Image (tube, grey):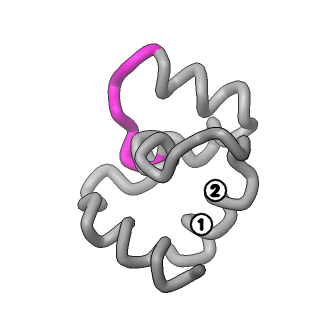
Amino acid sequence: MHSIISYASTHAFNYKTDKSIYNILSGKKTHQTFFDACSQQLLSLYHSFPKLKYPSFERFITEKT
């Protein structure tokens, strides 16, 4: 899980927020999130962690930096 989150955060566009990356990984059902996943070549990770909670994701991101 940690390696996938790390991959997604390093391959996402610089202007994308952590929340946008979280939405891709959790599979938020919006057109914008799906488009973001496609345009950033992260579609294979879309909805890969549907039960991931944002506080857990945020904790990993802050530990990584």
Magenta stretch holds residue 30: yes
Closer to the camera: disc 1 or disc 2?
Answer: 2
Residue drawn at x 59%, y 80% is: 65
In the image, taking residue 41 as reference, residue 46 lies left or right, namely left
Residue at the disc numbered 1: 4
Amino acid beneath label 2: Ala
Between 62 and 11, the residue placed more toward the observer is 62
Asked if the residues shown at circle 1 and circle 2 are in contact, with their CB atoms under 8 angstroms apart, the answer is yes
**In the figure, 10 relative to 62: above or below?**
above
Mark 1: which secondary structure?
helix
Mark 1 surroundings within 10 Å by alpha-carbon count, few (fewer than 14), some (14 through 19), many (20 or more)? few
Q: Which mark is residue 64?
A: none
Residue drawn at x 59%, y 66% is: 4
Residue drawn at x 63%, y 56% is: 8
Residue at the disc numbered 2: 8
Q: Residue at the bottom extreme?
A: 63
Mark 2 surroundings within 10 Å by alpha-carbon count, few (fewer than 14), some (14 through 19), many (20 or more)? many
Q: Position of residue 39 (x, y in %)?
A: 72, 26
Residue drawn at x 63%, y 36% is: 43
Residue 44, located in which quarter of the rendered image?
top right
Amino acid beneath label 1: Ile
Between 43 and 35, the residue placed more toward the observer is 35
In the image, taking residue 18 as reference, residue 9 lies left or right, namely right
Q: Position of residue 48 (x, y in %)?
A: 46, 52
Residue 38, located in which quarter of the rendered image?
top right
Mark 2: which secondary structure?
helix
Q: Position of residue 57 (x, y in %)?
A: 37, 66
Start-end of magenta stretch:
25-31
